[in-house]
Image (tube, grey):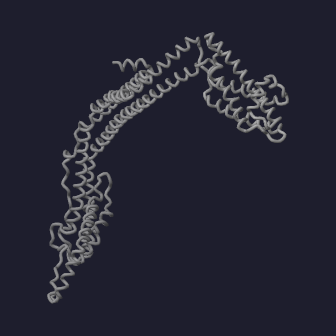
Amino acid sequence: MEGTIAPPNAGAANSDSGSIGWRHILAAALMPLASAWQKIRRGIWSARYSFGSDIAKPLDIERISTHLAVVKRASEEGSQNIPPSLEEAPTGTQREIIGYFSNLRRRAQKQVAETVEKLRKTSEQIDISDSLTKLRDVPANCENKIMRHVADFESQLNKTIEREQKQSQYYDAFCRKNGLDRVAHYPRAAHFYYLIAAVLIVAVAFALARFVEINAAGDYGVSAAWIVTVSAIAVIAPLLVGDVWLRSIHHVAGFRRSIGWIGAMLAIGAILGLALYADFHIAVVLANPDTSSRDVLDAILADPIAIVSPVESWKAFGLVSLAGLFAMLLGYRSDDPYPGYGAVQRSYYRARDVRDDAAARLRKRMNLRIDKAEAEIAAITKSFKNDVRSYARLVEHAGRSPAALSDFDAELEDACNTVLDTYREANAAARQSDSPLSFAEHVCFSPNDEASYQPPANHSSRVEELQTAMGELENEANLAREKLRALNLRMISSIAEPQAIDTDSAA
């Protein structure tokens, strides 16, 4: 658009020189804003040029005309008789319109050329041999990593295996020596029996205290400390006898069995003796509260037969004796009836559990490594298949591109002339002079060199080869999975069989 430059204002020469300073400051402050505005304008113009450059979509001529403000600019220029009537070649806005469509054409050609180049690079990147090599390396790499795990666990695992084997040998020897052909039977929670014994002590103490309270005329005389002590002895001593000594009655050795029976008789006698003493002590003290424990013992030693005379207090005898017998049964039942058999079997089972726990942790690491290897196989296979599918779609798209570009050229040419006609009609309607000679010009784009955008013919056969290779890749993936399963079974078997581990360790 042409125009004239106005002459400078004559009064400006007489302006105060101080005004020049603030103008420079204002210009410096506005310069960043002006620069930003120029960048925004360039971005808008670039977006306008990119609008409609996709050859897969039809051109929207009305929107292009609106974006370029064709009618508005034509009316403004026509009212000023621009372009001149003698203009023969398109200039100004007409040249901008032609340049816009020419730029769309160059962008479309660039898209097709980029598609062909991308097709070439994609074809070079897809390598079936590389994927097959990766698949074949997965089982070997997995085995190497598993062997490193085994090496890390080898010392610990061998110690647990050695301990388990020693306990197993001792267990077998104990069974042979004592003629045992059964598994030991004992409660899983032996401490529960000791909890019952504690409750029993409290119950006996409470019952004795209640008995003393009921039968006492005034001052009890029987102290709480004495009641608690007798109750504890009446339960704890028989409990220990039943746990340590009473099982000897089942021993295979005659001498040990005899000692067990003798100990059982003595224990029962001691329980009854304690019960008689408790009964006599309570009866004597209730009869005479001033009697001390020393006096009771002297009385028993002086006349032992007299201990059974106070029949009215025999409830205490029954309570203490039954509690003692029950406590001895608790101790006896807290482990296997055969002496020492439960402890031997528990030691063996603990060693076996420790070995199983170490083996389980190693198996868990192996399984995690196997799972990662299988995931790697699936990723390699999936990646190759996705690459082949993408390549096939790209080949199909590139094959259609030359014809689509040719059709797009024809559409661009028609659209360009249509927009030019819109401009020329609006300009002619607004001008006072004759229309320029350039308004009669028709835009023709030179035809494309289709050979430049035509992908090589071997890409179709390349797609067929890759699709055939997908079957080979799947077979190789299945073979790798079978190797991983075999590796997993072999390593788990080597862990489950201690001799195999020992042999590998010795080697």
Relative placement, left or right, of 275 versus 110 is right
Q: Is residue 348 above or below residue 135?
A: above
Relative placement, left or right, of 388 versus 493 is left
Q: Position of residue 136 (x, y in %)?
A: 31, 28
Write down the quadrant of residue 318 in the picture.
top right
Write down the quadrant of residue 106 in the picture.
bottom left
Which of 181/340 is in front? Answer: 340
Residue plotted at (46% across, 25% down): 355
Q: Position of residue 86 (x, y in %)?
A: 15, 72
How many numbered marks are there? 0
State whether residue 477 appears in this view. no
Which of 485/434 is in front? Answer: 485
Q: Position of residue 380 (x, y in %)?
A: 34, 35
Image quadrant where one finds the N terminus? bottom left
Residue plotted at (68% across, 15% down): 262
Q: Position of residue 81 (x, y in %)?
A: 21, 76
Q: Is residue 128 above or below residue 174?
A: below
